Image: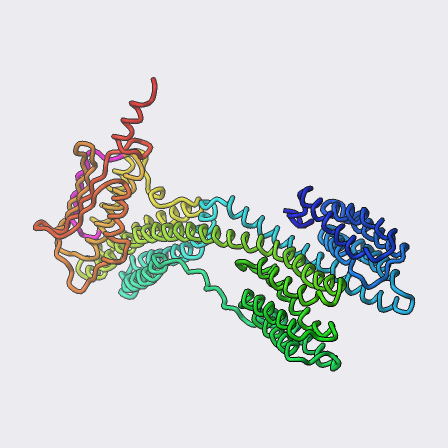
Amino acid sequence: MSPGGPTWMRSAGARACAALLVGAWVVVFLLDAPPTALLAVPLVVLGVFGVDRRAVSSVALVAAASTVTWLAGAPWGTVDMVLPFAIALYSAGRSVGSTWVGAGLTAVCVVTSALRAEPASILSAFVVSIVLFGSMWVFGRVVRFRALRAQQAVAEARALEDADPDAVSVDRVVEERARLADRALVTLRVAVLDMRASAHRARAGLDVTELSLIQQRGADAVDELRRLLGLLRAEPDEAPPRRARGLGQTAPLLARTLAPIGLMLGLIVTHPQWDRSWTTAVLWGTAILAVVLVHAFPRTAGLGLAAATLCALFDMPADPESLMPAALAYAVIAWVLATAEVRGRWSITGTLGGAAVVVALPNGPMAIAFIATVFLLPTMAGWAWSERDRILRTARAQGESLRAQLDTAAAKAVRNDRLRLAKELHDVAGHAVGVMVTQAGVALALREKAPERARSALEAVVQAGEDALAEIDALFGALDACEFGDATRRYAEPGQLRAALERMVAGVRRCGYKVELRLAELPSAPPITGTLYRVVQESLTNALRHSVGGDIAIEAWVEGRTHHIRVVDTGRPVVGRGTEEGSGSGLRGLEERVRACGGEFEAGASAGGFVVHARMPVQDGRGRPAVVAARAAAETPS
């Protein structure tokens, strides 16, 4: 889209029709002039035909035509050259980028038009020409800037249309993650470092203050993390609501309404010689009321003013200038109807214009020409003005729709990312802090009865802190790589997973729990390995927090095409300790992980204790279910 001429003038056929119509306009109003003035008609036709691509040449040809009429002796004050000048100067304002060139073209038009006036009135002719033709060029200039804005809006809409929702979502996710994830991980890391430092200090003298500090710091860390996890699980912030229409939007409408009403009242007050008959009073009153209502009720205003105009036929004013206030209302309504998306707007304009012409007929051709100018110029200007408005509105509506779609996709991605991060933080913090707090409690209980066992418990606190720091650093690395979740706990070989499970069980055993570990065939395909590890980790964490006095049995095996992992805790629940059910990151989070792998999950109390049982399909090395991998292998040509 170019900021040049209007779209309807880009077709050669449309330009030819417009040029012939304007030429006919000039012929009609030069019929009473000397015959040589008609030599200006070909210049006008050529000038109007070339407005789309050669605006400077178009203005020069129309100015030359005006010079011809001056040399031929055509009088000033007729409207023969108003329409050609309006089209040429408007197109120059739209197409010519240089302000100085546009001002020079306007000056040429002013001079060639004013020279037709009599010497006694040449000064006023120059003033009128400057205002009239300068307004035409300025109007084209304003429409040019509006066209550039519309062009920019279209470009933005196309950019949004070409935008990759996944890329936009990634950017939003990274921003949101940086806002919440780093804070949560730093909080957890500082807590683990403090607890580990207290364990180091307490090993020598088994100081009660340091041991209690470990437990208190662990409780504070859990509370803070629960709050941060709540933020992560909350819905992303909604976009701010749209602002209601304020004074900044209402003021232009008031100005467009009050300015013409003020001019109309000023004309009536300053011309006491005008006719004051009842028909004229009805026409003036209806004209003022129509200007007030036209922006809200354009059809009613236009048809009402047409009816009031025809009423003037019952008692025609002796002075035609008495109809000037109504002419101003005609121009305003013609503009509004041309710019508004109103059903039947052209028929309403035609009805009002026809009524005005009927009333002007008794006053001769010049009155009809004046009415034609009053309607034609505002209608053409309004159409040119609204053309870019329509493009701008369409582009903005399309942009808002596409932006809403991108925002929805990004919000969904942010929500999913928050939930994954909440699960990871829960897994890392829950197990590490749980083991450290439990071991500190063991050391506090045994500091006098069995000092060596108390120091062993403190060694377990230190070791659990080291393991937690390693997991936190791994999670930091995964966040920096924009990949975490199952990717943060993957084991390429069964031996790696087995070693990781054995280390975790050894840490729980140091807390005084009896844990039996029976591992048969283990998976090797992510995300099954990470999910199995998290099932065991969460089950042991819950045993540390919520039960006492029992044994824990962990068993992993393969049956058919299914991996099984079952954890049984025979301990009795600790009275006064709540569970984290409903947090979204405990057992429910485990269930989501298992189901994401295509498996099934069960957790609950039974006769033998609290049982957690997960079943996941056997997958190949690329994370596909075995049956899918087998089908793909069978379909691959040898």
Q: Point out residue 546 in the picture as x, y percentages from the top left corner.
A: 19, 57
Q: Please give left or right for residue 118 compared with residue 297 in the image.
A: right
Asked if residue 577 can be seen in this view, the reply is yes
Q: Point out residue 629 in the picture as x, y percentages from the top left corner.
A: 29, 29
Q: Is residue 602 magenta?
A: no
Report the coloring of the rendering.
Answer: rainbow
To which quarter of the image does residue 236 belong?
Answer: bottom left
Q: Report the magenta residues as a range.
A: 511-523
Query: Of all residues shown, which one is farthest toward the top?
Result: 638
Query: Of all residues shown, which one is farthest toward the right?
Result: 119
Relative depth, front residue between 482 and 137? 137
Quarter containing the C terminus: top left
Relative depth, front residue between 621 and 221? 621
Q: Is residue 515 magenta?
A: yes
Relative depth, front residue between 220 and 207? 220
Q: Please give left or right for residue 425 compared with residue 95 in the image.
A: left
Q: Please give left or right for residue 435 compared with residue 375 in the image.
A: left
Q: Please give left or right for residue 529 compared with residue 1 in the image.
A: left
Task: From this view, report whether residue 635 is shown above or below residue 214.
Answer: above
Asked if residue 201 can be seen in this view, the reply is no
Q: Point out residue 506 in the picture as x, y percentages from the top left corner.
A: 23, 45
Task: From this view, report whether residue 497 is shown above or below residue 360.
Answer: above
The residue drawn where x is 58% and y is 66% is 302
Number of residue marks: 0
Relative depth, front residue between 602 and 25? 25
Task: From this view, report whether residue 127 is shown above or below residue 105.
Answer: below
Q: Point out residue 531 in the picture as x, y percentages from the top left corner.
A: 27, 43
